Amino acid sequence: MFNVVIVEDEAMVAKLNRRFVEADSRFQVAAEFNSGKTALEWLRSHSADLLILDVYMPALTGTELLRELRARGSAIDVIMVTAAHDTHTLDDLLKLGVDDYLVKPFTAQRFQQALNTFCRNRSALDNQDQVSQKDIDRLIHMPLAADGLAENSLAEGDLPKGLQKKTAQLVWDCLQQAPYQSGISCEELSSSTGLSTVTVRRYLNYFLELGEVESHMNYDTGGRPSLAYHPVIQHSAGEK
């Protein structure tokens, strides 16, 4: 489980951030602060995986906090959640290595996308000594769309005959919510989307052909093993 630190001086936004983080079982809130200064003091003696950070705060801004952390050699991942949307601030924070940047007001879906991307990037690098060019392109050169799937994969003209963008988006959104380890079965996707299993299977086959989805046999079902699906996070160690 990933430990998260929330630094936000607006009580309502901090509460919202916490709710969204704790709704995802992969994360837990380790600490919450309403100022950059107190957060910096805590981070001097504690470690965390992810920082949810605002920019405009008294005493020490989010930018100043992050600059201080980087100067100390901290490589903590950072998701900015802020009202700041001027190009100067954005440029400064990108150079300081933020992972994502959400402008207030933001949606639950956009926040979840940021969490999903963090997990996907972590898993792509963990437990591997080497990565393939395809892995690198996914992480750096081929940013994902707001739904997590490459935009051109959902372009209406590029979809196979009989498949629709709206339905593909629906199936993909449900896939994104599935735990990586257990995945989600075709039947569970059918129940979640309201689509028939035959329809869901057609979209799953399309995502499999794109290389955006992987499948594995899930034996922890309490009954008969079933085929489970999840978005691609990492490739097999033998891929070069």
Image: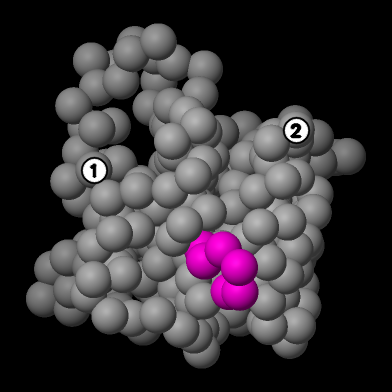
Q: Which of 232/156 is in front?
A: 232
User: Where does residue 85 sit, x and y in percent of width and height?
Assistant: 33, 81
Q: Residue 194 in the image: x percent, y percent?
A: 61, 81
Location of residue 158 with respect to 226 vertically, above or below: below
* Residue lying at 75% horizontally and 83% vertically, measured from the top left: 11
Of pointers 2 and 1, the one earlier in the residue sequence: 2
- The magenta segment is 57-62
In this view, 123 is above or below 159? above
| Label 2 packing within 10 angstroms: few (<14), some (14-19), many (20+) | few
Residue at 62% x, 32% y: name it.
217
Please state which amino acid type lies under the numbered disc 1. Ile
Q: Residues within 10 Å of mark 1 (few under 14, many from 20)?
A: few
Tell me the kind of residue under disc 2.
Ser
In this figure, which residue is indicated by the disc labeled 2? Answer: 45
Circle 2 — which element? Answer: loop
- Residue that mark 1 sits on: 140
Task: Give the total of numbered labels.
Answer: 2
- Per the picture, the main secondary structure of the magenta-coloured stretch is loop
Q: Quadrant of the C terminus?
A: top left
State the image coordinates of residue 21 (x, y, percent, origin top left). 70, 63
> Residue 58 colored magenta?
yes
Above or below residue 125? Residue 222 is below
Residue 84 vertical placement versus 152 (above, below)? below
